[in-house]
Image (tube, helix red, strand yellow):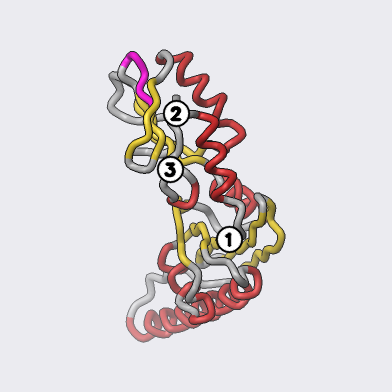
Amino acid sequence: MPEVLVPPARWPRWVTNFAASHGEPTLRVDGGVLRGTAPDGSWFSAGLPFSRSYAGPAEVDALLVAVAAGTSAPWGVLLVRKGGFAVARVEAGAVVASKVGQRHVQGRTKAGGQSQQRFARRRANQARVAYEAAADHAVRVLAGVGEVVAGGDRGAVDEVLADPRLGAVGVVGPWLAVPDPRRGVLDRAVADAQSLVVTVENAGQATARGG
């Protein structure tokens, strides 16, 4: 079911809008998330950033307290695609160190035979150099960080995190679908990583969307 990312600052208004459309929801905590069910049968579930489980009171504001507590320790964002990478260290909700880089990796070719093989080797070498550069910067920016929210190409992220120097870094959710990383993309990813992960379904509709 589709999910929406709701920044903490917008969460109380989001719930107010949901109630205005469907009626005041009954709240409960179940399965590590805050769930709300409206009189018309519509419902939502809201999970904490970083795939953390929520076990606090069934209250809108209490969920925000848990968000603040869960994002207090240093954490990071790592975005990697063949067109580049972006990495950031975040403390108290603010980026304190970051690096964005671009590396040229050739696209695929329709050529066949030996030409295709040479092209594939060249492309693989370019990708390897790009991932090594991303890993070098990630080691510097993420020193002492244990958790990162990642995005881009999963295989590329795995290649970067395979560096032994990053062995203590674990990936937490949500996974971020991003274009080739640039500064603006990184800034947006940092905001998305700190957002509540909300699933919502309106009664009588086959697909989920924002309330």
Please state which amino acid type lies under the numbered disc 2.
Gly
Res. 76 mark: 1
Camera-side residue of 106 and 2: 2
Marks 1 and 2, Cα distance to the nearest angstrom? 27 Å
* Callout 3–callout 1 Cβ contact below 8 Å: no
Side (left or right) of 127 relative to 38 = right
Q: Position of residue 50 (x, y in %)?
A: 48, 52
Residue receiving disc 2: 210
Element type where label 3 sits in the image: loop
- Quadrant location of residue 200? top left
Vertical side of 37 occupied by 23: above or below: above
Camera-side residue of 76 and 210: 76
| Residue with the most extreme right position | 96
Label 1 vs label 2, nearer the camera = 1
Marks 3 and 2, Cα distance to the nearest angstrom? 21 Å
| Mark nearer the N terminus (3 vs 2) | 3
Please state which amino acid type lies under the numbered disc 3.
Tyr
Res. 54 mark: 3
Question: What quarter of the picture does the C terminus occupy?
Answer: top left
| Mark nearer the N terminus (1 vs 2) | 1
Side (left or right) of 65 relative to 50 = right
- Quadrant location of residue 7? top right
Marks 3 and 1, Cα distance to the nearest angstrom? 21 Å
The region drawn magenta spans 36-40
Q: Position of residue 160 (x, y in %)?
A: 50, 73
Please state which amino acid type lies under the numbered disc 1.
Gly
| Mark nearer the N terminus (3 vs 1) | 3
Q: Residue at x 30, y 23 (%)?
A: 205
Q: How crowded is mark 3: few (under 14 residues within 10 Å), some or many (20 or more)?
A: many
Q: Where is residue 52 in the image (x, y as percent from the top left)?
A: 44, 50
